[in-house]
Image: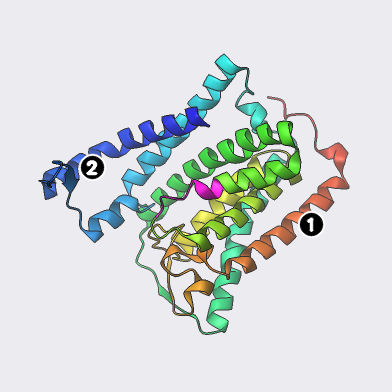
Amino acid sequence: MTIWSTLVSIFGLLAALPTLMAVMQRRGAVVTVPGGAMTISVTNEELNGLMSAAGTTMLAVSAATLVATVLSVWIMRRWFDGPALLDLGLHRRPGWLADSLVGLALGPVMFLGILLLLLAVGWAHVGAGTVDAAAVLISFGTFVLVAFSEEIFARGWLFQVLEKGRGTRWAVIGSAAIFALLHGFNPGFGAAALVGLFLAGLLFAQAYIVTRQLWLPVALHLSWNFSQGPIFGFPVSGLPGSGLLAVEPTGPEIVTGGAFGPEAGLVLLVGIALASACLYVLGRWRAARPADYGAPVSG
């Protein structure tokens, strides 16, 4: 984990550096005293642009994070006898494509259910969003990279290491807890967000256990983020969300999640319950057909 966090920090900073330098050139650096520390004056508009999934900066940082994740797996394989990347759950076994399609479908189902509930009780207003096609495509690319990076680490490497040493129960709890804590630097992160993201980690762990592959949790993670932000217009884990729809929560923050998004609100339980029920049905269906899910696809 130390190797991963170090490489992710270094690669992410290098990817964001050109944008940060551009901001420094536009806004100027301000030296404060005592101590002579250098700070950068950044407007809220510039900050939102830097952190938006529709921006090229986040796309670059997400790509750098995935490279750092893959490199970490290679280092663990090369010098510490760790598992190879494909062995973490990326073999194309029979059913991998169907699992991916299920994961892609669950995100819209979750957040449609959340939005309909908020509208039904009068705790949200919804209108047309202002996002364009280019922003949607960039956001999709960003969230693809994020999903692969976080799932390779959390449900691929971390879950499997914990399961081997402590058993499945501790692997589920431990990987979900660390997954939630990884978002600790996101804007607006607090106790409610910690609990919501822990529950998200439990759901992704369920997706992994159902298939023992990463394709379903990766696809679910992707569709979760993409549906939450670029489609329905909710904030994504505290990061600005602009989508095809524009949702303005008006109800209690403990329910809606406020500026952090549904992941910090009780309304998330609706989406989690819908997705978890679907995964349970999928697991029972797959268990009834064990012969259909075995060796990797040839070729």
Between 105 and 192, the residue placed more toward the observer is 192
Distance of label 1 from label 2 (alpha carbons): 47 Å
Residue 20 is labelled as 2
Q: Which residue is mark 1?
A: 281
Disc 1 and disc 2 in contact, CB within 8 angstroms: no
- SS for callout 1: helix
Q: Residue furthest front?
A: 34
**Residue at the spot x=79%, y=57% of the render?**
281
Identity of the amino acid at label 1?
A: Val
Q: According to the image, what is the colour scheme of the structure? A: rainbow
Q: Mark 1 Cα within 10 Å, few/some/many (few <14, many 20+)?
A: few
Q: Position of residue 214 (x, y in %)?
A: 65, 39
Is 241 above or below relative to 124?
above
Residue ID at (49%, 68%): 257
Left or right position of 111 against 235: right
Horizontal and vertical percent position of residue 263: 53, 62
Question: Disc 2 residue type?
Answer: Leu
| Mark closest to the chain's N terminus, 1 or 2 | 2
Q: Is residue 145 left or right of residue 214?
A: left
Q: Is residue 51 left or right of residue 285?
A: left
**Span highlighted in magenta in the image:** 179-186
Image coordinates of residue 126 in percent, x first then y, are 45, 77
